[in-house]
Image: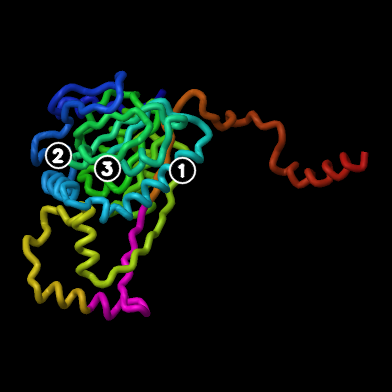
Amino acid sequence: MLRPVLLWRLTRLRGPAVSAGNGGRREVASGVPPSGSTSPRALNIFDRELKRKQKNWAARQPEPMKFDYLKEEVGSRIADRVYDIARDFPLALDVGCGRGYIAQHLNKEIVGKIFQTDIAEHALKNSSETDIPTVNILADEEFLPFQENTFDLVVSSLSLHWVNDLPRALEQLAETEREGGFSPHISPFTAVNDLGHLLGRAGFNTLTVDTDEIQVNYPGMFELMEDLKGMGESNCSWNRKALLHRDTMLAAAAVYREMYRNEDGSIPATYQIYHMIGWKYHDSQARPAERGSATVSFGELAKLNDVMSQGKKE
């Protein structure tokens, strides 16, 4: 089985590498790195500690499910794509799981056991119930505490767009996967054409990249901002403004309403989700025939209709 080798990634973790063991739902040692640390080759764009605080704040609200409509919908769509694959997955990993938006839509006939990781401990504590044996692990998407070739399926939903080093995160997922499918569903700040290259660079093949758009109508811009905050999706870039003046926000809301409002007075917000699906190389996969092994030339394909017609007459 072919895979990239990045042994140095395990040395940056606090706590041991985790392998899949027996048992049902349980908490495992944290794989979250020291605050502020990131890959030495990455652009440090996002404050990962702030993102952890934002997600924890959202998870601690009295009604966190009030803001989960987008993540629930995307989680359901991911589960549908897993069901479309004609095989089962004994061991799966959900990276950046939140409250378990994917696992709740799967069943133990398809997934035998699932590991769920998230950077926010309160999101894990509030994770949804499922009939699949589940292990919850506090871990950063940038520093996954798993041994190589552990999982048959790796999924991620609306999480990787806050990762500083997306190529490295994909390479880690390629290492942890055994032989199954990998399907991150993210809204990254990158060109669609680059996503396939990132998967190929990470060691995946048979690639599929497509996009979904989900439109939600809000009474106004402030309601949209409230929901984003409730989702834990507030801005966490280092160069963000610490304070937005009220006059600036009111002006922005007025411009937004003037330019984009619907006939009923609401304003639309379109969420664009990129779906990337790749498979890790395995000996059981079909391969192209060796060069020169063909027994029929392309020039003879034009005669195919004549041959078939003659066969029917006989």
Q: Pick whichever, 227 or 147, lies toward us.
A: 227
Q: What element carries label 2?
A: loop
The tag earlier along the polypeptide, 3 or 2, is 2
Q: Distance between the residues labelled 1 and 3?
A: 20 Å
Residue 284, percent across and down? 51, 24
Decide which of tag 1 and tag 3 comes sooner along the chain. 1
Residue 56 appears at what percent x and percent y?
A: 15, 45
Question: What residue is at 32 percent from the left and 28 percent from the top?
Answer: 176
Q: Mark 2 points at which residue?
A: 38
Q: Is residue 159 left or right of residue 236?
A: right
* Residue at x 27%, y 72% (from the top left corner): 219
Secondary element at tag 3: loop
Q: Residue 252: x percent and y percent?
A: 19, 74
Return the disc, 2 or 1, that comes first in the chain's sequence: 2
Q: In this view, does 244 lie to the left or right of 183?
A: left
Q: Residue at x 26, y 55 (%)?
A: 66
Q: Residue at x 9, y 41 (%)?
A: 36
Q: Give the range drawn in magenta.
A: 255-273
For label 1, the residue is: 81
Mark 2–mark 1 distance (CA, rounded to whole Å): 32 Å
Tag 1's secondary structure?
A: helix
